[in-house]
Image (spheres, grey):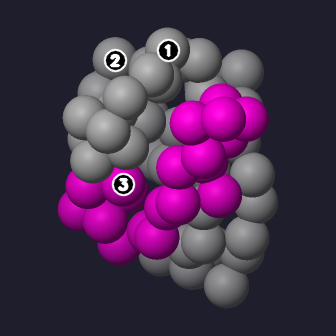
Amino acid sequence: MKKLTLQVEGMSCQHCVISIEGALKEIGAAGKVDLGSNTVDVTYDEEKITLEAVKEAIEEQGYDVV
């Protein structure tokens, strides 16, 4: 399992947390949003999910991965 922390811009509320964590869950990844630091800790299986897919899942919710 791969674990990483992504900087994400545009998050500000609980709706953001639910949107991002839900989108990651849909693709088979686990995500934990930290609004205070504007980060998302992501855990995923590199054999099943690419980093690009993780970033795309977040960006499709309207946030920017930097």
Say whether disc 3 or disc 2 marks the residue closer to the N-terminus. 3
* Circle 3 residues within 10 Å: few <14, some 14–19, many ≥20: many
What amino acid is labelled 2 in the image?
Gly
Say whether disc 1 or disc 2 marks the residue closer to the N-terminus. 1
What amino acid is labelled 1 in the image?
Gly
> Where is residue 36 shown, x and y percent of the image?
66, 35
Label pair 1/2, CB-CB below 8 angstroms = yes
Is 30 left, or right, of 42 in this rendering? left
Magenta range: 20-41
Say whether disc 3 or disc 1 marks the residue closer to the N-terminus. 1
Q: Which residue: 75% across, 52% down?
A: 5
On residue 41, which mark appears? none
Q: Is residue 31 magenta?
A: yes
Is 18 left, or right, of 1 in this rendering? left
On residue 10, which mark appears? 1
Asked which secondary structure carries label 2, the reply is loop
> Where is residue 57 shown, x and y percent of the image?
37, 41
Asked which secondary structure carries label 3, the reply is helix
Q: Which residue is mark 2?
A: 62
Above or below: residue 18 compared with residue 24: above
Q: Which residue: 59% across, 18% down?
A: 9
Q: Which residue: 65% across, 58% down?
A: 41
